[in-house]
Image (cartoon, helix red, strand yellow):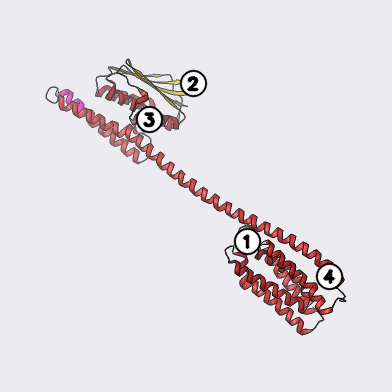
Amino acid sequence: MKDAWDRFNWLWEILFAVAYLATLVLVVLDDGDPVRKAVAAGSLTALALSYLLWGRRVVRDDDSPVAQRWVFAIIVLTLVGVSLFAASTSGFILFMACPLLFSTLEFRPAAVLTTVAILLNPAATIANDGFRGPTLHILLPMTAILVVFGVLCGKFIGHVIEESRGRADLIAKLEESQAEVARLSRDAGTAAERERLAREIHDTLAQGFTSIVTLAQAIESELDTDPAAARRHAELAARTARDNLTEARAMVAALAPADLAAGSLVDAVRRQADRLADSSNVVVRYEVDGVLPPIGTAGEVVLLRGAQEALNNVRRHAAASAVSVRLSAVDGSVRLSVRDDGAGFDPDHATGFGLRGMRSRAEQVGGRLSVRSGPSGTELTLEVPA
């Protein structure tokens, strides 16, 4: 009720003011008994003050008690009756009183009280002038019309109020739904960001620390037997640690991977292949077929992280002697292929985060990941659309 009803409430206030002032002027200008005119004018003024000081709040507040509404409606009916019996020209106040009753009570009791208020007009005329009053033959048909008109107007007012209440309830429910959607979106965004950070840490820092641990173990075993190899592995461990530090700073600053910031995707993947060759006995062959179409930073990050994960798996699990890394343009996409001659594994029963993270990354940019593995080796193919 406080939505559309309040928005157009100023129209009702104008009707109230015009009906009151017009009726008051007619009563004052009437040639009747001054005492009766004073009583009628006082009743009309009391009705106006009752509405302005109390009735407006009762009518406009949906939560106002039913008892208060009935008390106000009885006051309205009583003051209308007093003014009508005091001066017949007070009948014009019905244009204000009838809508007010329908705004105060439910439809059926309001229709009854409105009918009573309208019938008070001919009743007052009969009481004052008898059945031979000069205006009674006109007043009675008008009363019947007013009763019908008043009930129809009350029905319309009730319909407007119910529609406004329903609309207000719907708006409240929509606001609640929007708040719930916003909360779920925040939760989903938080979960997605956590997953993204988990992938970033797994694909960068965790792999780097794994390499450092592997190199440290190699240094420990070579320190006495092959100092040159130990020194070379120590240098590689230091470089890997520096790369990890750079990646960590880039991650904190929400920048692209440091390898991509320092050059192209082709160079970044080449550095990953070189690191595997430097830190192991695996023979690494790196190829780039043709000119790669632009795929944007997001796609380049997916391919680079895929290369890092695949080469790290070769280092840790494959026991391979040779690996091939290839970047190529295929049907409007850029394809990364990593193939090794290692022991292979069952992709359907892989339990690590790596493959799941790579597949999730690929799906986020509209790409796809496929893995084929067997006793003769493993081939990982990652495609990202241009």
Spatial CA span between label 3 and label 4: 88 Å
* For discs 4 and 2, the disc positioned in front in the rendered view: 4
Q: Confirm whether residue 335 shows in the render.
A: yes
Residue matched to label 2: 331
Indicate which disc residue 44 carries: none
Marks 4/1: CA distance? 35 Å
Foreground disc of the pair 2, 1: 1
Q: Amino acid at mark 2?
A: Asp
Q: Which of the 4 quarters of the picture holds residue 220?
A: top left
Let me know if residue 286 appears in the view. Answer: no
Query: Which label sits on residue 139?
Result: 4
Q: Look at the numbered discs 4 and 1 and tell me whether their residues touch, using CB distance below 8 Å.
A: no
Give the class, few, some or many, for how many residues have Cα within 10 Å of label 3's Cα (few <14, many ≥20). some
From the top left corner, tell me how far across and down residue 351 is, in percent. 33, 29
N-terminal label among 2 and 3: 2
Q: CA distance from mark 2 to mark 3?
A: 25 Å
> Label 1: which residue?
6
Q: Secondary structure at mark 4?
A: helix
**Real-space Cα distance between discs 2 and 1?**
62 Å
Between 281 and 54, the residue placed more toward the observer is: 54
